[in-house]
Amino acid sequence: RVYYDFSSCTEKSAQHMGCYWPNPQVESYIISIHKHFFLNCSLDRVMWLDPPDDTLTVLIFVPVCLTLAMIALVVWCSKRSDILL
């Protein structure tokens, strides 16, 4: 499938440039560009894993506590009229 996708891409690129297909010169040019820019292409996909439970708990708990503290601070300051004057 990967080779078919690459071959199809080179064919479309050659047709877009107004060249006939199959064209060895165009194909070698596109392959050289691909080798230059995508030298380190790998088929390995990055596997995203959930963080450990302790880390996840901290990442959730800290923003929730900060939000509650800010709400409490706003309510407390709004009830104290002497601070506003």
Image: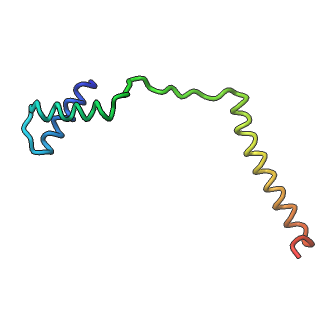
Residue at 42% across, 23% down? 44
Of residues 84 and 68, the one nearer the viewer is: 84
Quarter residue 42 falls in: top left
Of residues 83 and 26, the one nearer the viewer is: 26
- Image position of 58 (left or right of 75): left
User: Extreme right residue here?
Assistant: 82
Q: How is the image coloured?
A: rainbow
The N terminus - image quarter: top left
Residue at 70% across, 27% down? 53
Residue at 30% across, 33% down? 36
Q: Total marks drawn?
A: 0
Vertical arrangement, residue 44 with respect to residue 29, above or below: above
Of residues 36 and 20, the one nearer the viewer is: 36
Q: Position of residue 50 (x, y in %)?
A: 61, 28
- Image position of 53 (left or right of 4): right
User: Extreme bottom residue here?
Assistant: 85
Quarter residue 57 falls in: top right
Q: Position of residue 33 (x, y in %)?
A: 25, 35
- Image position of 23 (left or right of 12): left
Residue at 9% across, 41% down? 19
Q: Position of residue 52 (x, y in %)?
A: 67, 26
Q: Position of residue 41 (x, y in %)?
A: 36, 28
Quarter residue 18 falls in: top left
The C terminus - image quarter: bottom right
